[in-house]
Image: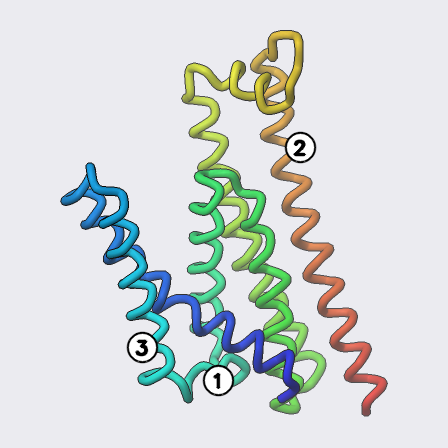
């Protein structure tokens, strides 16, 4: 396994535990010590540190195993990161198109390392892409519901786009529809590009 693959493996498998412990320490402290921001930050940092130390001392040997995982675990990781990215932008699905291409690379590279046939590689790639596309579609749907049920959505869109005129609900609908289509196409194109590049390198090396 090449150095950049090891880095990808450590980055993807090394994040869940620190992030989960960060949230576990942060949210209760935010409720208990709402008026003490420094204490909340210190407790959250303690959770993050505990997560990093857990990775180092308990899961160190597992951090390089990304390209040995089965489909179900890879799909679960793709789902986890999609949820995180959706939450990072507080309900905007823009970053949810990223896990698809990233885990497409992971699943294709895993099959290449295992010496799988091109048919198996493409089959697993298509399964992963369907999962990633479904997650992105769900994220877009959730965002659409939140936008359409928000009373001030037209003013929010007007402010976001810095428009001088009032935005109608027609414009909101168009943004939802074409924005979702754009993100789905972007995810598909990025994933297919990853597939093409990896398989082309494979054919050249064989």
Quadrant, the N terminus = bottom right
Q: Nearer the viewer, mark 3 or mark 1?
A: 3
Q: In the rendered image, which quarter is residue 122 located in?
A: bottom right
- Evaluate if marks 3 and 2 touch, with contact meaning CB atoms under 8 Å apart: no
Q: Residue at x 51, y 85 (%)?
A: 68
Q: Is residue 9 above or below residue 130?
A: below
Q: Residue 72's x, y, as percent?
A: 44, 72
Frontmost residue, 101 versus 75: 101
Q: Report which residue position mark 2 lands on.
A: 178
Q: Give the CA distance from mark 1 to mark 2.
A: 39 Å
User: From mark 3 to mark 2, how far is it between C-alphas?
Assistant: 43 Å
Disc 2 packing (10 Å; few <14; some 14–19; many ≥20): few
Q: Circle 2 — which element?
A: helix
Q: Position of residue 139 (x, y in %)?
A: 49, 43
Q: Earlier in the sequence, mark 3 or mark 1?
A: 3
Query: For mark 3, what is the residue?
Result: 54
Viewer-nearest residue: 96 or 107: 96
Residue 90's mark? none
The numbered mark, 3 or 2, whose residue comes first in the sequence reads 3
Residue 17, how many percent across, how many down? 35, 69
Question: Which residue is most to the top?
Answer: 165
Is 93 left or right of 53, judged from the image as shown?
right
Q: Quadrant of residue 168?
A: top right
**For the point 49% across and 31% down, which residue is it?**
144
The image quadrant of residue 119 is bottom right
- Report the side of 38 relative to 6 (left or right): left
Residue at 66%, 15% (x, y): give it: 163
- Mark 3 residue element: helix
Quadrant position of the C terminus in the picture? bottom right
Q: Nearer the viewer, mark 1 or mark 2?
A: 1
Provide the residue designation for mark 1. 65
Decide which of 136, 19 is in the foreground and name it.
Answer: 19
């Amino acid at each position: 396994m090449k150095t950049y693959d090891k880095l990808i493996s450590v980055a993807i498998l090394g994040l869940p535990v620190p992030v989960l412990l960060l949230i576990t320490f942060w949210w209760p402290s935010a409720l208990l010590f709402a008026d003490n921001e420094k204490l909340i930050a210190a407790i959250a940092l303690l959770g993050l540190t505990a997560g990093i130390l857990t990775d180092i001392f308990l899961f160190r040997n597992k951090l390089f195993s990304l390209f040995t995982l089965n489909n179900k675990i890879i799909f679960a990781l793709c789902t986890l990161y999609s949820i995180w990215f959706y939450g990072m932008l507080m309900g905007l699905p823009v970053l949810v198109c990223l896990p698809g291409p990233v885990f497409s690379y992971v699943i294709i590279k895993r099959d290449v390392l295992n010496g799988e046939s091109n048919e198996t590689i493409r089959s697993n790639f298509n399964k992963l892409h369907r999962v990633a596309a479904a997650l992105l579609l769900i994220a877009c749907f959730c965002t659409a519901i939140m936008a359409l049920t928000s009373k001030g959505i037209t003013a929010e869109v007007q402010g976001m786009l810095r428009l001088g005129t009032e935005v109608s609900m027609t414009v909101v609908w168009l943004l939802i529809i074409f924005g979702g289509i754009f993100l789905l196409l972007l995810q598909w194109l990025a994933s297919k590009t990853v597939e093409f590049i990896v398989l082309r390198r494979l054919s050249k090396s064989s």
